[in-house]
Amino acid sequence: MTRTPPYLSTPPQAAVNGLSRAPVLGRPRRRRRPALLALAVTMVILGALGATYLATSLGQTSPVIAMAREVPWGQPVTAADLVEARITSDPALEPIPYGERDEVVGLVAATTLAPGSLLTRQALTDQRLPGPGQQLVGVGVSAVQLPATTLRPGDDVLLVPVAAGTAPAGSGAGGSGVVEATVVQSGPPGADGLRVVDVLVDAADGPAVAARAAAGLVAIVVVAGE
């Protein structure tokens, strides 16, 4: 048997048809990263738990007290003024729970309570009007003795004599007869055309204001509030 000389044998990388044969590369091996896989699974689980918690928290509501109708400043709250409302828990809101409804009835509005608003403890007081050192006086005035603008509870006003020499000596600011007052409520016009306005005045001015009001010698001037 004849053997081909080594110098005539074709090496593995020998040219084929005049072209070099490319080396054959093996398939790349995929490197597994368990840490990244565990992190991805953890993030998916946390996302699902967050979505579940959000849906659950949004679905939980608490019954609180809301206003069914307006209660002016200084007026007591009645059961008919209150209604139940349900809201989600919010740290920024501090409404009174509806379970304490009976404790609210009879308290006084510390500010005008608007219908639909949530009732808070800061909006109520147990101090009834008139307070210490005050007197509540009803002043009957005609249409020309008060502004056409509706008087609101809490408005600061001046009670001004409409005729000279009718104010008792030493009453009001500087003896002029002008008295500072706060509106509690304003009634509708009566059959005689007079409207009665309840006002709070200092106890020292109460008798003089009542005397002038009975004579129809008081005009009401609204002043700028604080």
Image (cartoon, rainbow, N blue to C red):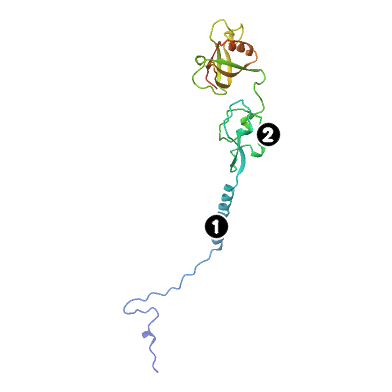
Q: Which mark is residue 7?
A: none
Name the residue: 60% across, 17% down. Answer: 138
Residue 103, which numbered label? 2
Task: Identify the residue under disc 1.
Answer: 44
Density class for disc 2 (Cα within 10 Å; few <14, some 14-19, many ≥20) is few
What amino acid is at disc 2? Answer: Glu
Which mark lies nearer to you, 1 or 2?
2
> Viewed as shown, does residue 31 lie left or right of 203?
left
Q: Where is 136 relative to 56, above or below? A: above
Relative placement, left or right, of 146 versus 21 is right
| Residue drawn at (58%, 16%) of the image | 139
Farthest-out residue, left: 18
State left or right for residue 26 relative to residue 196: left
Mark 1 residue type: Val
Q: Residue at x 39, y 86 (%)?
A: 6
In the rendering, at what x and y percent does residue 143 appear? 50, 16
Q: Is residue 113 above or below residue 219?
A: below
Answer with the quarter of the image where residue 191 lies: top right
How many neighbours does mark 1 have within 10 angstroms: few (below 14), some (14-19), or many (20 or more)? few
Q: Secondary structure at mark 2?
A: helix
With respect to residue 226, does 84 lie above or below? Answer: below
